Amino acid sequence: MKRTQINLREPHESDYGWAYIEPYVYPKGSKKRPVYLALEQIFREHARYKKQFNDEQNFMKQLEVIKKEVHYSLLRVGDAEKNARTLLHLWNNYYFEQGKQDYIELSNYVTPPVQEAMKEVDSYYQDLAAKKRSRNEKLNNVKAENDSIKE
């Protein structure tokens, strides 16, 4: 064991001097512990938290790698979905050519991302049509006013 003298700041001077160590030295409901045991416990906790922090950093790096891999997988899945829809269209065309009536409904084979994209496109075109209607109505109203003024 090595002997050393450590001077700690008073509790009113700093939160990390005696104020930090005191709960370890005088645990609630227990006898006073030697300061070296309290310091060892603090050092063990520090090592544990440092290891936990490093593990979290490694985990975050692994998540970044997985995120990139998933992104590329999703891109490939999108291509596969397009290919599957093309195949369904071709199959339905084959049925049509053969005169069969039992077609495969494409709406049953749409993934949620494609459904969301289709909804966004539909709402975009609905908004565009509404703007065009309102512009045409304004032009018609202005034209009607001009015609009534001329008469």
Image (cartoon, helix red, strand yellow):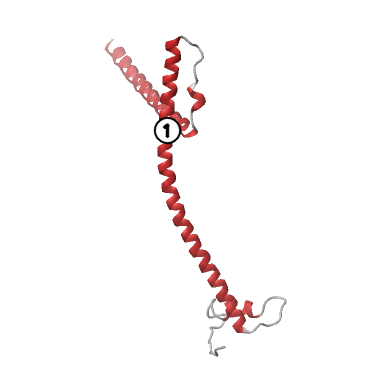
Residue visible at 42% across and 46% down?
A: 69
Quarter-wise, where is residue 48 in the image?
A: bottom right
The residue where tag 1 is placed is: 80
Task: Check the image and name the residue furthest to the left.
Answer: 150
Front one among 77 and 60 = 77
Look at the image and tell me whether residue 127 can be seen. Answer: yes
Q: Secondary structure at mark 1?
A: helix
In terms of depth relative to the viewer, which is nearer, 105 or 95? 95
The foreground one among 75 and 23 is 75
Question: Is 15 placed above or below 6 here?
Answer: above
Q: Give the left or right position of residue 143, taking residue 98 as reference.
A: left
* Direction from residue 110 to residue 130 in the image, left or right: left
The quadrant of the picture occupied by the C terminus is top left
What amino acid is at disc 1? Ala
* Residue drawn at the location 42% of the way across and 33% of the way down: 80
- The residue lying at 27 percent from left, 12 percent from top is 150
Q: Residues within 10 Å of mark 1 (few under 14, many from 20)?
A: few
Image position, residue 83 (x, y; %): 41, 29
Residue at 45% x, 17% y: name it.
92
Q: Residue 99 versus residue 114: which sits nearer the camera?
A: 99
Residue 123 percent location from the top left of the image: 43, 28
Query: Relative to 64, is 143 on the left or the right?
Result: left
